Amino acid sequence: MHKKLLIPGPTEVSQEILHEQTHPLIGHRSKEFSQLYAGIIKKLTRFFELPANCKPTVTTASGALWFDIVGRSIVQNKALVCINGAFSERFGNAIKACGKNANFLEFAWGEAVKPDAIAEELETGEYDTVTICHNESSTGTRSPIHEIGKIIRKDYPEVMLAIDSVSSMAGDKILPAEIGCDVIFASTQKCFALPPGLAISLVSDRALERAKQVPNRGAYTDLVDIFKFEKKHQTQSTPNIPLFYALDKRMDLLLEETYNKVYHRHKDMAEYTQQWAKKHFEMFPEQGYESITVSCIKNTLGKKVKRLNEKLEEQGFTIGNGYGKLKEKTFRIGHMGEWNTAAIKQVLAIIDEIWRLET
Ligand SMILES: Cc1ncc(COP(=O)(O)O)c(C=O)c1O
């Protein structure tokens, strides 16, 4: 039996979307591909309300490619890397692996990144880039990127703000014009509810200007080269063409639902899940900073998540374990992409039954 995915990615993909990938292949240098890609760019621009100075690009790779693109093409000398979980740490390690300096501004797992701490560090004048993970999937914590963006844009106009929105874009509020960020990226297997394999990034013209000043940008990670191909609505290398068809369809569906309704659907699911969690367990993240796409719940009752999943799977669902060092201490319910509150209620009611939780 197929187990519907309520893990923090990959998330469930509908048959309608999967079917889009069965289009006969076309050449990636053909007019047809350029038309398909130009349509996707237009739809991304509309959905994310991009101003003229911010442009989308779709790269063939998982989201982590953009850790390297930021490391290679954006960081000039030294980055301030905000760390509050496993993925923000990976972002920082990637920047160092690209040969750049990085100072890790660390918060405990489950804490949100605090704007004041960033402001204090930036006063040293040492940094040309700030990196942050909006939605730490490892801890279900959502950091206040709008407040952080405001501080950087007001006081440090030359500093680039690069945001990992891998598990929040197309679910949570991440409009670049509202945040004032320079690079914000996501993977297709999360809130876009597509198979993995593409990364979507929204990039400011300032970021592109910065990249032109940065030497040794690599090849696949060269932002300037990526945008050279964008001008022709093409990609540097052979892209995952079947997934481009699926993304095109997804953007139609997202536009039809509208940005605000997509956000409220995710918020609703999170609120329902959190109420349920607080009734039986505790939420892991700092209060007020809970993710709206993945709920990370403290396993205060010492329940066996593996055994739960064996039973849940018989009914066609699976949820997520805790991540890394939180594996036994927490469990995670991914409510992103095409899920809605009615379905979440159904799954949580099944968990109530399996775990014999009081209702
Ligand atoms: C917050 C976050 N950042 C980055 C990544 C890495 O993305 P990918 O696996 O698409 O490379 C993930 C993957 O789960 C994630 O949740």
Image (cartoon, rainbow, N blue to C red):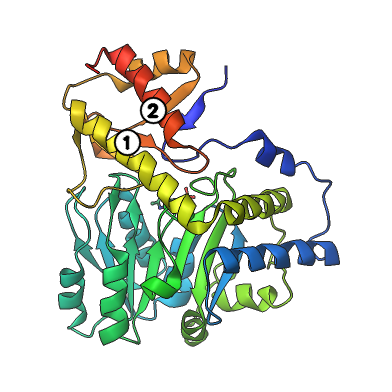
Residue 64 visible to the viewer: no
Q: How many marks?
A: 2
Q: Front-most of 228 and 302?
A: 302
Q: Is mark 1 within 8 Å of ligand 1?
A: no
Q: Residue at x 62, y 72 (%)?
A: 226
Q: Residue at x 83, y 58 (%)?
A: 27
Residue 48 visible to the viewer: yes
Residue 208 in the figure: left or right of residue 334: right
Whether the residues at callouts 2 and 1 have beta carbons within 8 Å, the answer is yes
- At label 2, the amino acid type is Lys
Measured along the vertical axis of the image, is residue 308 above or below residue 152? above
| Quadrant where the N terminus is found in the figure | top right
Q: Where on the picture, by quarter, is residue 335?
A: top left
Q: Which residue is mark 2?
A: 345
Q: Where on the picture, by quarter, is residue 328?
A: top left
Look at the numbered disc 1 and give the secondary structure of its residue: helix
Q: CA distance from mark 2 to mark 1?
A: 8 Å
Measured along the vertical axis of the image, is residue 72 above or below residue 352? below
Q: Residue at x 25, y 78 (%)?
A: 151
Q: Front-most of 257 and 139?
A: 257
Look at the numbered disc 2 and give the secondary structure of its residue: helix
Q: Position of residue 216 (x, y in %)?
A: 50, 78
Q: Position of residue 279 (x, y in %)?
A: 19, 28
Q: Residue at x 68, y 48 (%)?
A: 246
- At label 1, the amino acid type is Tyr
Q: Where on the picture, by quarter, is residue 126?
A: bottom left
Earlier residue among tags 2 and 1: 1
Q: Which residue is mark 1?
A: 272
Residue 30 in the figure: left or right of residue 69: right
